Amino acid sequence: MVERYQAIRKELELFEPALLQKPEIVALNKLDLIEADPELVERSRQALIRRIQAIRPLPLVGDEPYVLSAVSGNGLKELTTAIWQAIQLDKARETGRTEAPVLFPDDPAIRREQK
């Protein structure tokens, strides 16, 4: 698992080294295979946190790494909310604001903006 993460980061570095300085969010899929054992899920998550921090200089985002199951949908809302907030924060920084608006992907104001 960590080897794949390192391989992806190496590919990004070879393509464009500046990409390694961009915000990123790590997510683990296939939670449905181990979610019956919450202790195993948390131990795996904590081990991955330590390994991610040893690989990249950027701070973790929210509850990263996000653990999810694409099959059952568990964890998807948390991940999409984190992605949305990271995008909004990045936009806020670009425009000189110090904080991002507190909106969530399913907020009615966002649906209006997208029309």
Image (cartoon, rainbow, N blue to C red):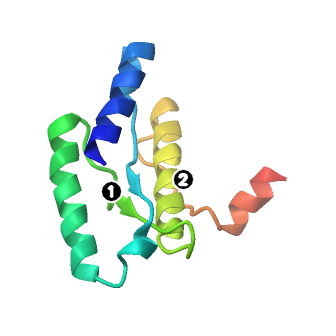
First reached walking from the N terminus: tag 1 or tag 2: 1
Left-right relation of 21 to 88: left
Viewer-side residue, 81 vs 25: 25
* Mark 1–mark 2 distance (CA, rounded to whole Å): 14 Å
Residue 30 is situated, as x and y percent measured from the top left of the image, at 44, 65
Residue 15 is situated, as x and y percent measured from the top left of the image, at 45, 15
Residue at the front extreme, as displayed = 33
In this view, 102 is above or below 32: above
Q: Amino acid at mark 1?
A: Glu
In this view, 84 is above or below 53: below
SS for callout 1: loop
User: Is residue 21 something one can see in this rendering?
Assistant: no
Task: Mark 2: give few (<14), some (14-19) or many (20+) Cα within 10 Å.
Answer: some
Residue at the right extreme, as displayed = 115
Residue 6 is situated, as x and y percent measured from the top left of the image, at 29, 34
Task: Mark 1: give few (<14), some (14-19) or many (20+) Cα within 10 Å.
Answer: many
SS for callout 2: helix
Left-right relation of 39 to 72: left
Q: Residue at x 28, y 81 (%)?
A: 38
Left-right relation of 65 to 86: left
Q: Residue at x 25, y 63 (%)?
A: 45
Q: Quadrant of residue 54?
A: top left
Mark linked to residue 64? 1
Viewer-side residue, 70 vs 17: 70
Q: Quadrant of residue 22?
A: top left
Given contact means CB atoms under 8 Å apart, are the residues at marks 1 and 2 in contact?
Answer: no
Q: Amino acid at mark 2?
A: Trp
Left-right relation of 53 to 33: left
Name the residue beneath numbered marker 2. 84
